[in-house]
């Protein structure tokens, strides 16, 4: 596994954000660059505030391809790979004790939940456009029959993924069209940038994140503070419902980002989002 480590530009706070992108996006999602005088790089903004940022492609995508003979990769095994890599990267990035924030966008949020529940690496979990509510509209009738059946999803994951996508890692997507605020960026240039940082979709991660109840044991195991952020044109369950399944913690914040779609880092509200994450993380 490989990752990019962005070190703090000012006196370090001792906080490290370990970031996983959503399905179909590479770790470049966290470093989109500057457009029209606005900095859309999450990594740049957070390092300027004194935090370290580590961004990593999900196993099997982008800079982290699997060997050709690797067996079908289920999300829980993928989270074990992520945890091992994260521990190694933290050892490189931190000179002493550090608090680690697990941050995931969309499907990357689900992978962050699995990683935390299984390995307990993070002092807090931040989820951007991500919840445990599933995406029913992305499922056909057969896939919907698996809702709430975690054991069946785990057992039949490979069959479900190949049936839907034809392959474990689905390439060929051109990324968002920009025709909708929900899936694009704030401008045509930012939408084009989102297309540039696209990568093959990890099918099993996408499938599990869409099937409600498929990782409920891990959701209920989260006992650290939670930070949710959703665009007001986001996907998934209504934001106020997002905390409900996370019964292991009562320390929860939910933020609604105005004039913002699913790709929240590609909108001017990134300034507000980073300020709120800075405040929240310093208080952990």
Image (cartoon, rainbow, N blue to C red):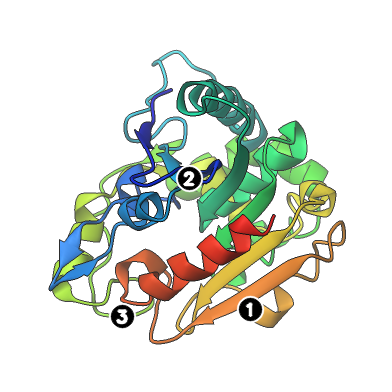
Q: Quadrant of the N terminus?
A: top left
Which of the two labelled residues, at mark 3 and mark 1, occupies the earlier sequence position?
3
User: What element does badge 2 sit on?
Assistant: strand
Q: Residue at x 25, y 49 (%)?
A: 197
User: What element does badge 3 sit on?
Assistant: loop
Front-most of residues 143 and 278: 278
Q: Quickly name the residue at label 1.
A: 239
Q: Residue furthest front?
A: 11
User: Which label is found at residue 180?
Assistant: 3
Label 3 or label 1, whichever lies nearer to me, is 1
User: Which label is found at residue 20?
Assistant: 2
Q: Position of residue 96 (x, y in %)?
A: 58, 26
Q: Is residue 33 above or below residue 191?
A: above
Which of the two labelled residues, at mark 1 and mark 2, occupies the earlier sequence position?
2
In this rendering, does residue 128 appear at all? no
141 relative position to 8: left or right: right
């Amino acid at each position: 596994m490989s990752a990019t480590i962005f070190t703090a530009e000012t006196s370090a706070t001792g906080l490290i954000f370990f970031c996983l992108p959503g399905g179909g996006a590479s770790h470049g999602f966290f470093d989109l660059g500057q457009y029209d005088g606005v900095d859309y790089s999450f990594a740049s903004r957070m390092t300027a505030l004194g935090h370290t940022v580590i961004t990593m492609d999900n196993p099997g995508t982008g800079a982290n391809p699997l060997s050709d003979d690797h067996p079908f990769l289920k999300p829980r095994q993928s989270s074990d790979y992520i945890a091992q890599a994260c521990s190694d990267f933290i050892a490189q990035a931190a000179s002493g004790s550090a608090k680690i924030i697990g941050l995931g966008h969309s499907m990357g949020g689900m992978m962050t939940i699995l990683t935390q529940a299984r390995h307990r690496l993070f002092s807090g979990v931040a989820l951007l456009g991500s919840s445990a509510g599933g995406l029913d509209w992305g499922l056909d009738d057969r896939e919907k029959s698996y809702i709430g059946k975690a054991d069946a999803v785990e057992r039949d994951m490979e069959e479900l993924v190949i049936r839907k996508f034809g392959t474990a890692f689905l390439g060929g997507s051109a990324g968002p069209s920009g025709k909708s605020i929900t899936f694009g960026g704030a401008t045509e240039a930012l939408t084009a940038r989102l297309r540039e940082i696209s990568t093959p979709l990890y099918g099993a991660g996408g499938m599990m994140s869409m099937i409600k109840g498929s990782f409920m044991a891990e959701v209920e195991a989260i006992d650290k503070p939670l930070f949710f952020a959703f665009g007001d044109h986001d996907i998934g369950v209504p934001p106020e419902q997002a905390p409900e399944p996370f019964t292991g913690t009562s320390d929860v914040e939910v933020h609604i980002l105005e004039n913002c779609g699913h790709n929240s880092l590609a909108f001017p509200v990134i300034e507000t989002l980073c300020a709120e994450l800075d405040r929240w993380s310093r208080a952990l």
